[in-house]
Image (tube, grey):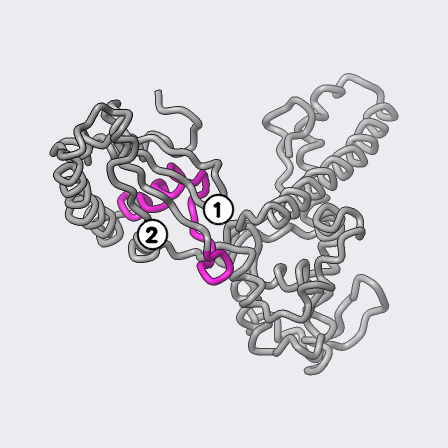
Amino acid sequence: LICGNDVDARVKLFEMETDGIVPITDEMLNENIRIAIEAREKNVKHESPKKREEFVKQTCVDLVKQAESYYRAIGRIMLHSLATFHTMSSTAMSSFYQNWFFRDCSPGDEGYHKHDIAYHLQGIGANLHQLKSTIGVEYDYIDGKPEIVTEETFFTKFIKDRFIQSRRISINALKEGLTLNGSIPISENLCTMPLDVVQSLMFSNPLIRAKDVIEILNPKYCVSWEQADVKAEDVPGIREEQQKFFETTLIPFLKKKEGLASEEQSDFLNSFLSFCTGYGYLPDRAGNPEYGIDIEFELLHTYPYPKSHACPEPRSVLVLPGKLCIQKDFITNFEAAVLSYKGRFDMQ
């Protein structure tokens, strides 16, 4: 979130932890806004103290409203993903907050076991051992008077206060966007499902393995050979060459990319999926059985690089030049095309 037109006055809305993105606390949001206002206050430093005070107060109100709009928009993007059966990235939301947003399940609920809470807290950067030091100590709850944290209230009340109630601005706005102001009862439909089932249906697998990518590939050989002025008696030989390329060149190439240790190389599978589907991750196969990539060996395609069509749902299409792909240098062109696509919508 940028404060006005001043790129130096930025307001941070999320933090990135091991298990995914975490909305910041109201206290941190207000502090970030205060810092942003200080950066903007240089624009009115010559005004009277009263005008500067008015400026700070109004800017604070405006930025909170703007932050809420951003959170609301993100919630609606998530809703759109669900409505159109687009799996969300596993890093879009940590498991702790997935439980809260999609299942209305929070610490203290009967089905949310303590060992699961501890595991999910670790994923959002919380140190459970350090948090437990509050047991036996008086704590100022947001919604009430100070009281001593007990072994029981640590899970049923303290955790909820510390990680949900303390983030009301972000969580309420995100939930408004996700449910269209409560008109779509998402949690009512999902609360009976275990979290791992909800995750498999709605979020991607964070680990991309070559085996999983290869399983969704469906080669189609000698596409459009009739229009390409190819003789029928030549088709079996061309098909054999294309199949050989797929099985002995492309598949080993993808496996090799997973096996290489460097981050740049291991990231290739992510780039490959982005090139073919528009998304750099894999949805759960059980929840999305139709998802896949058709590889068309197109004989009308004579450009020495691959192209893709990510629009056909649920299967995307990777088009390879039917004759040129069997040449030795094509795999180099293939890799260059995939890597050049990352982060952009063209290949110039």
- The x and y percentages for residue 112 are 64, 75
Q: Which quarter of the picture shows residue 103? A: bottom right
Residue at the spot 45% in from the left edge and 42% down from the top edge:
279
SS for callout 2:
helix
Q: Are marks 1 and 2 in contact (CB under 8 Å)?
A: no
Foreground of the two, 178 or 59: 178
- The x and y percentages for residue 166 are 73, 57
Q: Which residue is mark 1?
A: 314
SS for callout 1:
loop
The residue at the far top in this view is 46
* Few, some or many residues within 10 Å of mark 2 (<14, 14–19, 20+): many
Q: Amino acid at mark 1?
A: Pro
Q: Is residue 110 above or below residue 54?
A: below
Foreground of the two, 207 or 131: 207
Please state the extent of the stretch shown in magenta in the rendering: 265-289
Q: Which mark is residue 213?
A: 2
